[in-house]
Image (cartoon, rainbow, N blue to C red):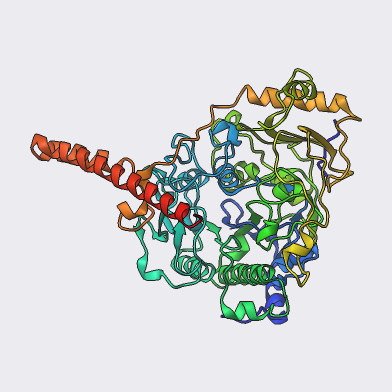
Amino acid sequence: MKGVCRSAAPLFTVAMLSRLSCLLLVDTKALNVSAPHIVFFMVDDQGFRDVGYHGSDIHTPVLDHLASEGVKLENYYVQPICSPSRSQLMTGRYQIHTGLQHSIIRSRQPLCLPPDVPTLPEKLRQAGYSTHMVGKWHLGFCRPECLPTSRGFQTFLGSLTGSGDHFTFQSCDGAEACGFDLHDGERPAWELSGNYSTLLYTEKVKQILRTHNPNKPVFLYVALQAVHTPLQAPAHLLQRYHSVDNRLRRHYAAMMSGVDEAVGRVVQELRERGFYRNSVIVYSSDNGGQPLSGGCNWPLRGGKGSYWEGGVRAVGFVHSPLLAGKGKVSRALIHISDWYPTLLSLAGAPLGDSRLLDGHDVWESISQGLPCPRTEILFNIDPVSRRTSEPDRRALNQSGFGIWDTSVRAAIRAGDWKLLTGNVGDGDWFPPQTLPGGPQQWQTMEKRQDQRGKSVWLFNITADPYERADQSEARPEVVKLLLARIAEYNQTAVPPRNPPDDPVADPQLHGGVWSPWLGLREAEGQKSSRAAPNGAKKGKMAHCKVCKLRALFKKVGSRLHRTSLFL
């Protein structure tokens, strides 16, 4: 198959953007590029169209400028939901190789990024970097060793769960489990409640830069909570979009403008503190936008949670004085797992056993337009998500040619071709959400029925990036080849780790805060058994049983209350 690698603050003023532009007119030969500063911006749920240079109605002058003076990644892929994308950034490994192939990591789930898999910040620290994280973790926190400060980051200010209020930092997992989720290191940062998350995280990054020696390399992971729901923004940002009648789109756009300004402030701080001339800045969304929550992926098909292009094709660019070629558009096939080996290579850090990695070093493809080492992407194989409503299982077996059970949710891209099997998510196209009547008027404008009774789709993404012409029946030989490739990958998969929620994780059992709940009692029990009489450890065990009972009664009571509301 043919490969695809080819070569409360005011808006930023034109003068400020011009100052940023002047920074790019440097002699890169004079720079010390042995250990560049690395700043990685991860934006939550930004739609493919939701940036100015993709034709958005949202104003993003800073992002547009940085991308235009850097390299736009226009064949760049992530995962369709939060935890999978973040896990692959941190490890360089596909979900099937970490056991995280099913869904996100839920707040009460005793699950986290495997502790035996080295992370990007851990490797960078070994190479002499200072490592700092602000923003959303969402890679599990059931045990202390799962926390960001235990996985390579020297400092952390942010949230552990998947979403929460952008001002109060209250986060809920269902109606029955809510708690505070803003942490400074390993302690709850109660005193910072009331700040808007995007502004708070930006100020923290600036503080880090002001106290750091620019001669020592630094890795900043800026994982903004925006533009994830709940859709909230300060009044001065909302005012800019007062003419947008669609309330969801208005709030979403205001949040996106906040992101744009945040990136600009960080870049300005890099310049003023002497970091910029030896920095690599990466910008990425973690998945596609959610059309029902204000996002827009038009003209791509589908959205967040789906393996259609709208769910996995992301906004991404690289901006750096160290780029050999600037003002370029890269069509190289790049996946979020590639940042792990790429950034470690730039840092001069050893990769370890590269056979364990699914990512590729793509810096020369980005910077110089050289041939790309990646020719395919396995998006996922999720045996937990299967089509169970198909009336005839034999038809599924026939569609899999005896090679692959096509009821299993899976997706792969190889060269120009993309194959999807199973329940891959809603496959609609959602036009730009600017109609005055809100979602009711555009939600059914382009409904497609081609998902009914089907479990296999094939598209030539290069010729048909909007996935409108299914080729599965016309090109059975390509279907067979890609099904066989999925089956090969599946032979290397580890079992999915998807434990049930633990009622003991309820924040109300831990001072009203989302925090680790496993391992702590074991450690305390061991200490008390050494220092206290025999009955002390039993007391701890009894207390733990009481906690479980309290959590169970609360959960049942909450469900009974919700049920009574509908009687």
Q: What is the residue that sits farthest to the right in this orientation? A: 474
Q: Position of residue 474 (x, y in %)?
A: 91, 30
Question: Toward which corner of the image does residue 270 lie, by quadrant?
Answer: bottom right
User: Would residue 175 be seen by someone viewing this image from the given angle?
Assistant: no
Is residue 112 left or right of 439 when viewed as pictured? Answer: left
Q: Residue at the location (49% across, 64% down)?
A: 165
Vertical side of 40 occupied by 165: above or below:
below
Image quarter where the N terminus lies is top right
Q: Residue at the location (55% across, 43% down)?
A: 87
Is residue 495 left or right of 325 when viewed as pictured? Answer: left
Q: Residue at the location (70% across, 75% down)?
A: 17
Question: Toward which corner of the image does residue 345 lie, by quadrant?
Answer: top right
Q: What is the residue that sits farthest to the top in this orientation? A: 402
Is residue 7 left or right of 160 when viewed as pictured? Answer: right
Q: Nearer the viewer, residue 83 or 373?
A: 83
Q: Position of residue 18 (x, y in %)?
A: 72, 76
Q: Position of residue 159 (x, y in %)?
A: 46, 57
Q: Nearer the viewer, residue 207 or 27?
A: 207
Question: Toward which corner of the image does residue 226 lie, by quadrant?
Answer: bottom right
User: Would residue 191 be seen by someone viewing this image from the given angle?
Assistant: yes
Q: Nearer the viewer, residue 237 or 406?
A: 406
Q: Nearer the viewer, residue 189 or 279?
A: 189
